[in-house]
Image (spheres, helix red, strand yellow):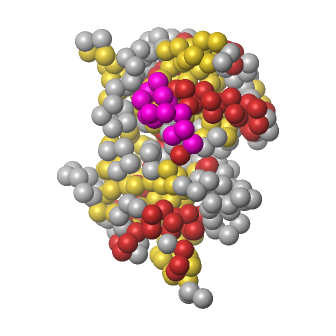
Amino acid sequence: MSAQVRIPATYMRGGTSKGVFFRMADLPERCRVPGQPRDRLFQRVIGSPDPYGAQIDGMGGATSSTSKCVIVGPATVADHDADYLYGQVAIGDDFVDWSGNCGNLSAAAGAFAIHAGLVDPAHAVESICTVRLWQANIGKTIIAHVPVADGAVQEVGSFELDGVTFPAAEIVLEFMDPAEGEGALFPTGKPVDVLDTPDGPLDATLINAGIPTIFVRAGDIGYTGTELREAINGDPAALARFEALRTLGALKMGLIAHAGEAAQRQHTPKIAFVSAPAAYTTAGGRQVAAGEINLNVRALSMGKLHHAMMGTASVAIAAAAAVPGTLVAEAAGGPRTGVTFGHPSGTLRVGAEATERDGQWTITRAVMSRSARILMSGEVHVPADAF
């Protein structure tokens, strides 16, 4: 019988997500590099793979929003304060997806860099500590503007974020040059493509900003765009159709070479459906009026409709809304540098700066606000033979 290993860890909420955060130096040595030991460790920490889909024997919460691990360490890129690496742990399947970022946990990563001693809050200007994160999954810069007080992160505040029950201190995030990796904003060069589906041709915007995302019109696939989770997640046939569309989009974007690869790349791309502004009732019972928003967006994460909106998908929404001709700009009534969109838990305001040069569009940055809070700190216990 092997003993359990104790590893320093911090359980944090960031935006509408939660994850287990580690300092790179605190990980077992064999888990400080990519590979099976690191994946196995994170799976055991979270409680996956779990055929029951409950993650009872781990820290996960049995949703894509709560099945996450993060490593923060010293910066490896000049002019940055810390490296931030994110792993999306599959719930029932046997893999950890490292193919993209988590925008929500980016807020927590900035705060954690201060908690972990990688950034000195004494450098704050007017009670805001600017943390330059190197997002190692996608090789991009994220700037987190973290409020501080009395030499520490200020977590309590009045900022309210739909999808999060309690208010907290606001963290402003800037996603610099957010097209993932070195890819084009539109991998096919067009703001609208056509996917050849079994039901016929389907218009889609395939964009590479924040996270690769596929946008389709809600009406084209039989929805209003005001749906809540139960309408989608309780329909296995609908989920299968969305996964088939996601696979088609991934192929067209060049993210996978053949359809079989999509099952092992569930984190990216995302798939979302958009519609013109319309009133609806949120999952929490709040009435959202059509006049409050520019459009409605619903997005799927790890095969299920998200309860709010992924932070990285919010970047994609902001980017697509800023470019003429995309389905997102169409739903918003025309291109906008800032939009407020409706999601299942409420509304969110996001913005992006778009530039056209020689017929090609680029996004210089996208901005949104989130909050973060430590929920628990100490050590996680993992069986020594698990990794």
Image side of residue 183 versus residue 197, left or right: left
* Res 272 quadrant in image: top right
What range of the chain is rendered magenta?
250-263
Q: Residue at x 62, y 53 (%)?
A: 93
Foreground of the two, 128 or 367: 367
Q: Is residue 283 above or below residue 279?
A: below
Q: Is-magenta flag for residue 256?
A: yes
Q: Is residue 93 above or below residue 197?
A: below
Image side of residue 345 versus residue 335, left or right: right
Residue 107: x percent and y percent? 46, 50
Residue 311: x percent and y percent? 51, 41
Foreground of the two, 218 or 377: 218
Image side of residue 275 versus residue 120, left or right: right
Q: Is-magenta flag for residue 323?
A: no
Q: Residue at x 47, y 24 (%)?
A: 252
Main secondary structure along the magenta-highlighted residues: helix
Q: Residue at x 69, y 19 (%)?
A: 221
Foreground of the two, 365 or 260: 260
Foreground of the two, 253 or 221: 253
Residue 301: x percent and y percent? 60, 41
| Whether residue 12 is visible | no
Total numbered circles: 0
- The quadrant in which the N terminus is found is bottom right
Q: Residue at x 77, y 37 (%)?
A: 236
Q: Is residue 156 above or below residue 334?
A: below
Image side of residue 308 versus residue 72, left or right: right
* Res 208 quadrant in image: top left
Residue 248: x percent and y percent? 55, 26
